[in-house]
Amino acid sequence: HRGGGTQYNNVIGTINCLYAIKEFAPDCHLVKLGTMGEYGTPNIDIEEGYITIEHNGRTDTLPYPKQGGSFYHLSKVHDSHNIHFAAKAWNIACTDLNQGVVYGISTEETMIDERLINRLDYDSVFGTALNRFVIQAAVGHPMTVYGKGGQTRGFLDIRDTVQCLQIAIDNPASKGEMRVFNQFTEQFSVNELAEIITKAAPKVGLSPEVINVPNPRTELEEHYYNAKNTNLKDLGMQPHLLGDNIIETLLQYAVQYKDRCDKTLIMPSVSWKESGSKVVTHGNVKA
């Protein structure tokens, strides 16, 4: 039911948006916030949306093969296919932003007032690796590395999410084009993230422990990963790279608000290998 709901919301919602553009705003530019998770972890370099191949003496440039690792990621794959078709069939201008894992809580706008601070998910469903580790370190819970910890992904600061969206909007695709940007700034493994936080934590008075826990996901825990991300840089993106000052700021925020943390949300509550897992997130825990 939950997997079906995710597919329905994303896929049908995108199709409805495409039809609305066709009927009412054919000259607008669609910007879709997708995910690097569409690609999976292939044993070749990940290009930006398209790959040129030679087969049996013929050459063509085709959409890069997609291997989404969950029903959510597969819904975004289906979105990309539908947008690609609509761009060609209806001459719509489209940009697909394949976004990496986002970390951080502040943008220039949210820093204007403390009441504008973004939410920070740390549960096992919506919480991303770096943000989860920061919360775990702040509340004295061991940082939970899933499996071997060699899982590698592209990451970016939340400020760069905003920056990339603005760049895509300011530099629209051509009519009939589905343009793809890989939206991330750096690549890290889960083990590398844990090490980065372990080194930075003493500067704010913390000494987190790292533990390996059984991986609730179905994924490769050691693999090749090398994704291209030049298109946004060519348009002027100035990345905020992950340094000690960013980690320290995140840890300080987490310590400041650690009394709001529900530690029952920290450990994995959903196993991809089992049916009937109980989903536990911020939204269904009583205050």
Image (cartoon, grey):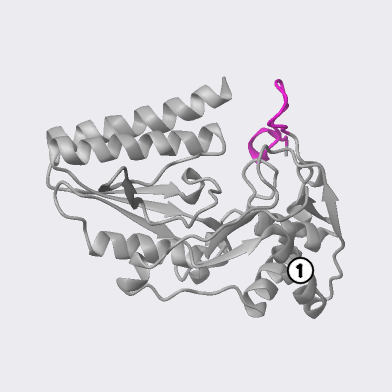
Q: Position of residue 124 (x, y in %)?
A: 70, 43
Q: Is residue 141 visible?
A: no
- 282 left or right of 169 in image: right
Quadrant position of the C terminus in the picture = top right
Which residue corresponds to the image point at 75% horizontal and 35% vertical from the top-left?
A: 269
Quadrant position of the N terminus in the picture = top right
Which residue corresponds to the image point at 64% horizontal and 48% vertical from the top-left?
A: 127
Q: Position of residue 212 (x, y in %)?
A: 83, 51
Asked where in the image residue 270 lies, by quadrant, the reply is: top right
Three-letter amino acid code at the position of disc 1:
Glu
**Most foreground residue, 224 or 108:** 224
* Residue range highlighted in magenta: 270-286
- Look at the picture and state if 158 lies above or below 145: below
Type of secondary structure dominating the magenta stretch: loop
* Secondary element at image label 1: helix
Which residue corresponds to the image point at 42% horizontal and 52% vertical from the top-left?
A: 98
- 112 left or right of 172 in image: right
Q: How many marks?
A: 1
- 99 left or right of 250 in image: left
Magenta includes 285? yes
Which residue corresponds to the image point at 60% horizontal and 56% vertical from the top-left?
A: 224
Q: Position of residue 152 (x, y in %)?
A: 62, 57
Q: Which residue is mark 1?
A: 195
Callout 1 environment at 10 Å: few (<14), some (14 to 19), or many (20+)?
few
Q: Is residue 130 visible?
A: yes
